[in-house]
Image: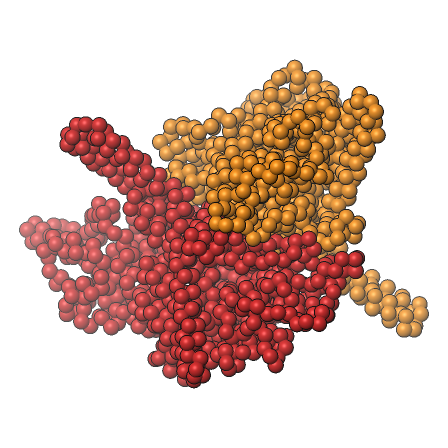
Chain colours: A orange, B red
């Protein structure tokens, strides 16, 4: 989570490619890939055959044959590596190991703290120092380490994975650096004993693992690197992440689907189940091998009675837990966001914290650990227990509250921590819930890798326990009146509470399944389901889920969900929300039009229509393509070519006196130049990199200042020329300049004139990648349908056509606005209840600084030196 | 399932509407609906206000105010009825009641049989008669009742629901008749004690319930009847069906998603959970209220020990169960299909059975019940037990096999049935498995409402038990060597086996969850998951799922799934599979072209391009639209108009001698006619029904014989005229004929000439519904992507374009062919392993008899009388 907002600025993402272009690119890619594979396959078989021959010659016994066999086996195995299931098994294995090692390290860290605290029991002050310093050091280290190595590793990771699975490419989110930072940062953060969870980060770690494994496996060939397959694998990885974290394969798959997907392909289902089951299995087997457990059982095994788990008349109490958890969950999300926003808004605090990045984590940790100091306030809230221990005690099947039976319950083991000589267990529980609630909300804003699921889960369990103990105190002999006494099981209430609160915070139903898998008992299925559904109903009507809230805080490019049963969504049409003033280019436009469109517009892609009159949509072109077209037209190589041509013509004219008019001649020359260039282009295109590549590094510079662009209409505008020069600073000019033996003797005025002429030429779209099938909607498509299509296909815009004629465009921005309730059928603005809570973050469109603006600004700072030493700035711009 | 193939022929479905048109229609529909709602709302509020006023006048006391309050409350309640959750609660409640009542009746039926059998224990022959007659009567009644009332109710219903959720409209599948037939038929079928299940039919029953409830609720207004919402509700209903059948809400949701969906919208998730949980809750509460149970617990509660459910070293045995179940599941599907196909192919048997429809069910029942007769062969296979009793005994946590301890295990209760004085319990189990296996495969082919899930589940449990008992006999003291003796629990193996076999047959993973919910214990989660995944892996590579198999047998229009990790699918492109010879019409074509295209083509929709040269795709038009265009152009009303015009012109010519040439005049006349007609059309269009309506009844006639069409190019062709006359026999001619005081005095020759002239006119597309945004792909889209898009959007065809130019079309047929492996990258036909098993059914395209052919044949039989009495046949054709 963005505690100090710095990681948000570091977030540089690239909108997903357009639908049509994407498929086209995929096609081109696949072809190249196939060619590459075929080639490498041949090469490999050749080398292997020669190797086999070598072996045969080396010793001509049986041994050689064996070796050939081995080689063949190897070859077979390598060819099998491409199979999905091998990938999934490797992923599961790896993640189980990571999960187990992380758990092991966390356990050691926590033991160390306890040991230090226990060893110093002679002096309370020393004890306090040890109790407090240890987590502060660990958290500070974690924050610093993550900040330095990979700031992307901060936070949960589920919001980012949700965005990535939506098709958006978030840079640096799936690199090895991030992996290392996340794993080490997470271990330290959780080792500190702060109320943080490992579940969200594990989703991210699993995805990182999958991405790295995929890269590694592609060394062996196969179809790795295929984008749609990668997305499938990432979805499976998310399931593995949850699965190996809780040893909950089914819950893991469902939870990961609920939090990351909008539409789920059932055919990917098995991948998740397969990998998550394998991972959970290995994770638990490791525990058995390590002699922690006797056999494979649940992580937080409960032992409730099976015959009569609960009475029918206890159901209202369960429903109350559900509804209260719903409110609690919404409050948690709100509190969490409030803290982030408070710190961001207070500019003084913010500036100070930005300077001393590690101060905020240290302060928060100091506060939290001071309050949980066992001899201090911690004694009233079981501060001694780690998260795991608290959960185990909360799920205990014995009753803590005083029973009708005279003798007081005998607290054994960790349960002792809940007992206080002066204070009732109810007070302890209430204090625990209240303190942990704000502590967790605060702690999850620390910029370290951490999740909020587990803390919330524990708080929910405590709340459930509180209700359960109250019920047990109220009905000491149980409620059932038919003979047998079945006392109330407060542990069952704890299970229900845990599922309900975590369900409310994350807006998922599958926490119910996770709870069953964690406890190893499913006897409370109906109460759990009822409570989870009620909690979801309440929480979803009040607040977005924690992950969606973070998405908004971080302004990630994500489309909000349609709410529960908002019927008005069926009545809004695309024509109500579309932008009618579409930027387009015509098939027969000249370069000047292109230039103007590029300077004024903001969109990533532009529509290509047949003509301004017919407006028949032919396709769409990416902005970068147009920029490269323009840069080719006005580029230095072309100009040099022109100079050469001119010199040749001059020579000719000097040697032979022709009778053609000068105007006529120049026109012919420019025609010739154009043809020549276009053939050169086509001969270059297969080998050179895509033209937009060199422009990209410019986007990464964080120091770019926004300014309104000036349109260089006057030919004497110096900067206009420089801009155009900037465009042509692409690497393929190097190759051209080798044979360019002419010197650039044109004056600025001449250049401007030449460029003016060039701009009047008609655009040649031959070498331009056109997306021939951009997604089209009709005016009357409903918002509901549009949302579905956008989510399904991961679009970021769609054209609205009417019998082939382009009449509008709808982008994610419009859709987002419409969904968030600013548009209704009548065009009046209506805000949904509590909308003010929801859209307190501004829309993410601000991030969409056009590439041209950035280029413009960049050039401004570079144009002057460029005038003198063109070759130097050429290098710089790469 | 189609035992005699008759229901398959009765299946008349209508392909889903095209994507673009669908949204457009939805738009139009929604607008109308909105208008209707607004109107009815106003009307309602007016009536209510007046009613309130009436009340005030009637007695002016406090009572009146109360009544106004009541009225307002009513109004409020009615307005709330539109909410999703009310619908879902009602659905859940209804289905729980249905499920409980069905279960109750089945239990009574089974008890009655036992009572009869028990009462006649003096005479074995009478006993046999009673044992056999009872099920035969019930099954025969069920088959007969279903056949008469609604043949659509036969079989499982899951394949049909899968097809409906894909977007295809199956007629008569969601009517009240079907509901009644399905519920009563199912009760009788299961009451007979045959190895049949209630789970598949319950999915269908729940969908029926949802559809009927939706219709009922739409009486109160609201947004019911919206198609996309209906689909969402049907998906939720499927979850309810499974949920209330097994009291398994989570498993129900997951199972229904796995068997019915290809892509699942996570936002619909809660609907399923909500309704299924509520339904399962009510279902179990009913049992408590009926004093069957003390409190809410699982349906087949197990009592395995929690501490040490299984040893790590037992896992290979579980894996063996999984793999064997995979083969078993595939065999079951194969066997089931083999039986259906055998009966269909043997023409003699088939003809005989078709005549005596009830003979087949009766014979099968006789065979099965004879073999299970307890004093006969039944004693070796626990024939005495009902399905439920067998399952309860199989999941027992005691061990049956002789233990190391001397004294033999004491069989109590129903478990006695498994014990035979002479025969080992292993033999009994093996016999049970083998006999039940083929019996279930046979019984599910009977044309009654029945599912195969439960029988398969029981067989799986028996198989698991067999393995478990063997393990128990092999390791009498358990495997664990560390001190404590943990004996092996054969019941746990039964749970694993049940989940694995049912998972293999249905190709689902969620049977694991169902098993946990059914038994109320989740301690065996890892063995179950491992076995289910292995079973799925084996079964999916051998055979389609049972439901997909039925879809193929019934030839339902469904797109097959992409298999597990078939990498070559990523390398096939649309250009490899598309049809390049696209039927199209141009914007400026004449009616003759339209006519020719309609006569030669088969497709439901035709592409509209700008011109044959440019081939720019403008949209697509439905065949029916074109037919109505043509019928309007050549229709009787226009001809009468022409006659009137001609008569008027004649009059004019007689009165005033003009100097214009006759040719010139006629041309002008025809021009005038055209304009006049077009204005008339537009004035008619808002009120009259859609033009294609009257053509539809013709499609229902089963007696249509296919013939090659003759193209009526010669103007003297009599049938050509009649065909055209037939086209104009639409109901809107009635209105025209009222004022048509002219008599049709044209000779056939004149008519032919007139029609020839009409055909040469340019088509006026103004009143034609054009889909302006048909789905477009590019040539290089991969098969994988195409499949995804088709599944996601429920397309049945898509155009392939290249920069706006239409270059091909891909329909479901091509896609199906490509997926089933007849096309590869190199264009060589390769069949996947065991493909011969899979595509034994021919493609469903045969069903696509063009409407025109049917019309043609129909006209052939009607053209002669029509010549004499045109008005009569006009009536007939309506």
Image-based side of A270 in relation to A811, left or right? right
In this orientation, which residue lies closer to the viewer: A877 or B750? A877
User: Outermost residue, right direction?
Assistant: A59
Where in the figure is residue B533, as x and y percent of width and height? Answer: 63, 59
In this orientation, which residue lies closer to the viewer: A749 or B408? B408
Q: Can residue B777 be seen in this view?
A: no
| Residue at the (18%, 71%) spot, across then down | B865
In this orientation, which residue lies closer to the viewer: A470 or B23? A470
| Residue at the (58%, 43%) spot, across then down | A489
Where in the figure is residue A787, as x and y percent of width and height? Answer: 47, 41
Image quadrant where one finds the C terminus of chain B: bottom left
| Residue at the (46%, 77%) spot, across then down | B369
Where in the figure is residue A87, as x and y percent of width and height? Answer: 70, 54
Where in the figure is residue B685, as x and y percent of width and height? Answer: 25, 47
| Residue at the (41%, 43%) spot, across then down | B85
The quarter of the displayed image where residue B57 is located: top left
Establish if A823 lies above or below B528.
above
Image-based side of B377 in relation to B474, left or right? left
Q: Is residue A576 visible?
A: yes
């Amino acid at each position: 989570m963005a505690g100090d907002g710095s990681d948000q600025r570091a977030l540089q993402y690239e909108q997903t490619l357009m639908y049509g272009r994407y498929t086209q690119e995929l096609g081109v890619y696949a072809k190249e890939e196939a060619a590459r594979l075929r080639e490498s396959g041949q090469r490999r078989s050749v080398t292997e055959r020669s190797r086999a021959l070598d072996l045969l010659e080396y010793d001509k016994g049986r041994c050689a044959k064996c070796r050939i066999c081995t080689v063949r086996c190897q070859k077979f195995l390598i060819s099998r590596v491409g199979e999905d299931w091998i990938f999934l098994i490797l992923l599961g294995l790896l993640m189980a190991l990571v999960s187990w090692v992380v758990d092991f390290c966390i356990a050691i860290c926590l033991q160390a703290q306890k040991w230090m605290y226990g060893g110093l029991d002679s002096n309370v002050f020393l004890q306090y120092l040890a109790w407090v310093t240890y987590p502060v050091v660990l958290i500070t280290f974690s924050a610093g380490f993550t900040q330095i190595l990979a700031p992307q590793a901060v936070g949960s990771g589920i919001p980012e994975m949700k965005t990535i699975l939506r098709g958006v490419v978030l840079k640096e989110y799936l690199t090895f650096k991030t992996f290392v930072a996340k794993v080490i940062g997470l271990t330290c953060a959780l080792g500190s004993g702060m109320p943080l969870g490992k579940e969200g980060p594990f989703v991210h770690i699993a995805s990182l693992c999958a991405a790295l494994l995929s890269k590694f496996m592609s060394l062996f060939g196969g179809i790795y690197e295929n984008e749609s397959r990668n997305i499938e694998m990432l979805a499976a990885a998310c399931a593995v992440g949850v699965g190996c974290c809780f040893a909950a394969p089914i819950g893991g798959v469902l939870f990961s689907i609920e939090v990351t997907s909008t539409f789920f392909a059932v055919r990917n289902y098995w991948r998740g189940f397969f990998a998550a089951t394998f991972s959970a299995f290995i994770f638990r087997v490791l525990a058995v091998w390590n002699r922690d457990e006797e056999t494979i059982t649940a992580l937080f095994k409960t032992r409730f009675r099976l015959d009569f788990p609960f009475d029918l008349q206890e159901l209202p109490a369960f429903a109350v837990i559900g509804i209260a958890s719903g409110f609690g969950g919404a409050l948690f999300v709100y509190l969490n966001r409030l803290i982030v926003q408070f710190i961001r808004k207070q500019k003084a605090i913010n500036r100070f914290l930005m300077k001393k990045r590690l101060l905020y984590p240290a302060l928060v940790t100091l506060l939290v650990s001071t309050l949980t100091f066992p001899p201090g306030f911690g004694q009233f809230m079981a501060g001694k227990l780690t998260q795991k221990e608290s959960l185990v005690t909360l799920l205990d099947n014995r009753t803590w509250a005083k029973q009708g039976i005279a003798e007081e319950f005998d607290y054994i083991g960790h349960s002792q921590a809940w007992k206080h000589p002066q204070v009732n267990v109810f007070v302890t529980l209430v204090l625990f819930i209240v303190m942990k609630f704000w502590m967790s909300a605060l702690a999850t804003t620390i910029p370290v890798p951490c999740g909020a699921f587990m803390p919330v889960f524990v708080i929910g369990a405590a709340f459930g326990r509180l209700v359960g103990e109250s019920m047990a105190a109220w009905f000491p002999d149980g409620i059932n009146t038919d003979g047998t006494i079945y006392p109330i099981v407060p542990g069952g209430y704890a299970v229900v509470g845990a599922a309900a609160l975590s369900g409310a915070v994350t807006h998922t139903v599958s926490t119910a399944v996770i709870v069953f898998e964690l406890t190893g008992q499913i006897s409370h299925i109906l109460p759990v389901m009822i409570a989870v559904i009620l909690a979801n109903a309440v929480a979803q009507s009040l607040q977005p889920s924690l992950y969606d809230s973070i998405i908004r805080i971080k302004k990630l490019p994500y489309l909000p969900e349609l709410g529960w049963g908002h019927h008005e969504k069926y009545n809004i049409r695309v024509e109500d929300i579309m932008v009618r003033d579409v930027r387009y280019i015509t098939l027969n436009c000249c370069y000047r039009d292109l230039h103007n469109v590029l300077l004024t517009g903001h969109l990533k892609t532009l529509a290509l229509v047949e003509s301004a009159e017919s407006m028949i949509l032919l396709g769409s072109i990416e902005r970068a393509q147009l920029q490269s077209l323009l840069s080719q037209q006005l580029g230095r190589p072309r100009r040099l070519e022109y100079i050469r041509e001119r010199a040749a013509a001059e020579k000719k004219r000097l040697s032979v006196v022709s009778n053609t008019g000068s105007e006529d001649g120049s026109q012919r020359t420019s025609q010739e130049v154009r043809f020549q260039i276009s053939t050169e282009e086509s001969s270059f295109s297969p080998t050179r990199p895509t033209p937009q590549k060199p422009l990209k590094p410019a986007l990464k510079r964080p120091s770019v200042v926004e300014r309104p662009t000036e349109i260089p209409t006057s030919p004497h505008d110096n900067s206009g020329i420089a801009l155009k020069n900037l465009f042509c600073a692409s690497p393929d000019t190097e190759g051209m300049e080798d044979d360019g033996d002419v010197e650039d003797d044109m004056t600025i005025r001449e250049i401007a004139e030449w460029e003016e002429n060039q701009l009047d030429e008609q655009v040649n779209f031959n070498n331009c990648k056109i997306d021939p099938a951009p997604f089209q909607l009709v005016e009357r498509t409903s918002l509901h349908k549009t949302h579905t299509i956008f989510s399904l296909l991961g679009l970021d815009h769609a054209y609205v056509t009417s019998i082939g004629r382009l009449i509008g465009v709808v982008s994610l921005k419009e859709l987002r606005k419409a969904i968030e309730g600013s548009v209704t059928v009548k065009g009046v603005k209506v805000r949904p209840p509590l909308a003010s809570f929801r859209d307190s973050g501004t829309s993410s469109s601000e991030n969409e600084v056009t590439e041209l603006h950035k280029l413009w600004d960049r050039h401004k700072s570079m144009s002057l030196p460029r005038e003198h030493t063109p070759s130097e700035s050429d290098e710089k711009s790469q």
